[in-house]
Amino acid sequence: IDGVSGSLERVDRFWLEGNEYAVACHGVFAVDAETGTVISVRDYVDLGEWRQRVNPVLEAMASRSSTEVVRGHLAALKRGAPLEVAGYFALDATLECPEGKVIGWDALADYYTALCTQPELSALAWEIVEPADAGEVAVDWRFPSSGEPRATGRDDYEVRAGRITCLRTTLPLTGS
């Protein structure tokens, strides 16, 4: 460190499909000496090594069927695992529901973090309607209450390259 810059070697860790992948990184930090504020960071990583490790996993994830993606998403939702739920979405995905739109992975992660605090999620029941299109899946869902549906709805998913790109929720499900 020379007073206005410094460097840090570290290992960044990522989890994909339940497995940890690590990559060595080197960061160079510039600091405003008067305020002690970091004013820039330059990160260096061997992208060839990183791609060699994660590309097979990302390719396998991208080849999942739409139904497989939706089943995984719903199972994580029922378990109350918000980051796993959000992990099934594309970075620029949209959720459209009666309350409004949620756009982008960060906002979806926040949305599901709040939603997953609801204890009734463990009672969620659903039926996947066979997709008409390889990239679309519909799910009829309900929250039972004393044998009668308390809430019902339909979720229409658009899935591309193994990720949910759009989810539209309709309430109430007609005909129930």
Image (cartoon, rainbow, N blue to C red):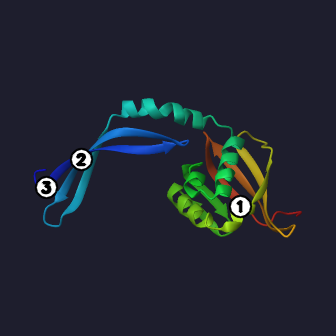
Give the residue displayed 19% in from the left and 53% down from the top: 30
Instruction: Specify few, some or many for label 3: CA neighbours under 10 Å numbering under 14, 14-19, or 20 or more.
Output: some
Residue visible at 23% across and 58% down?
A: 39
Q: Where does the image place residue 36, in percent across and percent down from the top left?
A: 18, 64
Determine whether, in the image, residue 89 is placed left or right of residue 123.
left
Disc 1 marks a residue whose amino acid type is Ser
Residue 4 marker: 3
**Is label 3 in a helix, a strand or a loop?**
loop
Q: Identify the image quadrant of residue 13.
A: top left
Q: Position of residue 167 (x, y in %)?
A: 66, 55
Q: Is residue 49 left or right of residue 77?
A: left
Name the front one of labels 1 and 2: 1
Earlier along the polypeptide chain: callout 1 or callout 3?
3
Q: Compared to 147, does 154 lie above or below?
A: above
| Front position among marks 1 and 3 | 1
Relative to 122, is 18 on the left or the right?
A: left
**Residue at mark 1:** 122
| SS for callout 2 | strand
Instruction: Please report the residue visible at 59 percent of the width from the left and 56 percent of the height from the top.
Output: 81
The tag on residue 8 is 2
Q: Give the alpha-carbon distance from disc 1 to disc 3, as whole Å.
A: 53 Å
Type of the residue with mark 2: Leu
Q: Position of residue 94 (x, y in %)?
A: 60, 56
Q: Nearer the viewer, residue 34 or 104?
A: 34
Instruction: Tell me the amino acid under the disc marked 3.
Output: Val
How packed mark 1 is, by other alpha carbons closer than 10 Å (few <14, some 14-19, many 20 or more), is some
